[in-house]
Amino acid sequence: MKSKHPYPVTQRPIKAMKKSLFLLAFLCQSLFAQVPEGKKVISSLYIHDLQTGKSEMILKENRHFEAPNWSPDGSFLLINSKGKLEKIGLDGENLGILNTGEVQKANNDHGYSFDGKTLFISSGKNEIQSHSSFIYKVSAEGGVPELITPLSPSYWHGVSPDGKFVVYCAPRNGNYDVYKMSVDGGEEVRLTTAEGLDDGPEYSPDGKYIYFNSYRSGMMQIWRMKPDGFDPEQMTFDYHSNWFAHVAPNNQIATIITYLENQKEGHPFGRQVKLRLLNLKTKELKDLTEEFYGGQGTINVPSWNPESTKFAYVRYELEDL
């Protein structure tokens, strides 16, 4: 697996560069959840219980927030809104903003290490006015963040169970691919080389696989591969756009978000979606929710409770200004 550009930047094919720029513009627009003119966003935070099969709304506010993580100790949820990370109690109580120092432009790609000691954050830099995304690490309790990736954009999605590597999505060679890097920084290693967007990489709790979504088949589907990038295996096969496989701590199932209409290589805000459960052994899919208005921001990051019995997600509504 190559970790550098296969040829100098100035000699990259123009077609690949245009495709990368188009995807970057599309993804950036989605990240900031562009909404129709004259509308504002209402966000609702839900907890779904696998045992009862029901989703309970714990918080509804007239603002835009995204991407809940469940804390490793099971006591609260972590969301992002307006570049900051907020702790939300399981009863919906706002527990305050997490101290992340100079990192004040967090996007919806963030999450905890398996041991619960470290938080990884994708964020822009204050001195960069246009969209950017770098990966930082900080103590789970908050504090002074440390930059991991020097190149932007880099969108964090997972960390290895042993805490040694992060995996992320990035455009480095005219195509969005999956990369990994030491949690202490250093050289990035390219793990995917197929044409089409590869995104949302997450390690399984046993460390045997990295799950990701890919457009390599001409439809966005869930795949997995070995941690070195070899032996890719397709996990979903239908005619929907399937994104973000979040593997439960029990290593048996994963949640995915499904767009009912083909979104090609995009995962925009404001579409009809549903959440489904993927059996990692049989590859069987089961609907967990009815259709609802969501998409980007609904369930971008790992959001399972430690017992693998519940997970958190966000639904949206639009209201006239």
Image (cartoon, rainbow, N blue to C red):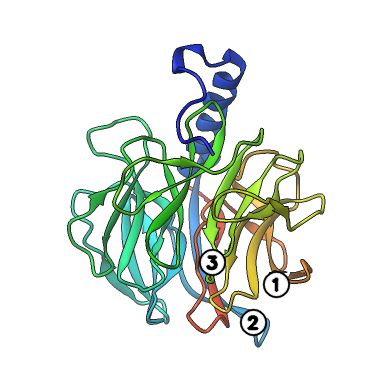
Q: Is residue 282 left or right of residue 193?
A: right
Against 73, is 64 above or below? Answer: above
Q: Earlier in the sequence, mark 2 or mark 3?
A: 2
Q: Which residue is mark 2?
A: 50
Q: Quadrant of residue 244?
A: bottom right
Residue found 39% across the figure and 76% down from its top: 72
Looking at the image, which is closer to me, 235 or 18?
A: 235
Residue found 17% across the figure and 56% down from its top: 144
- Quadrant of the snapshot with the N terminus: top right
Q: Which residue is mark 3?
A: 313
Percent across and percent down for residue 19 are: 59, 24
Q: Type of residue at label 3? A: Tyr
Residue found 52% across the figure and 24% down from its top: 6
Q: Is residue 107 left or right of residue 284?
A: left
Q: Type of residue at label 2? A: Leu
Q: Quadrant of residue 85?
A: bottom left
Q: Is residue 144 left or right of residue 15?
A: left
Q: Earlier in the sequence, mark 2 or mark 1?
A: 2
Residue lying at the far right of the rendered structure: 238
Q: Is residue 254 left or right of residue 237?
A: left
Q: Quadrant of residue 4?
A: top left
* Residue 40 - label: none
Percent across and percent down for residue 198 are: 60, 43
Q: Type of residue at label 1? A: Leu
Looking at the image, which is closer to me, 115 or 68?
A: 115
Secondary structure under tag 2 reads loop
Against 33, is 245 above or below? Answer: below
Distance CA(mark 3)–CA(mark 1): 12 Å
Q: Which residue is mark 1?
A: 288
Mark 2, Cα crowd under 10 Å, few <14 / some 14-19 / many 20+, is some
Distance CA(mark 2)–CA(mark 3): 13 Å
Percent across and percent down for residue 38 are: 51, 40
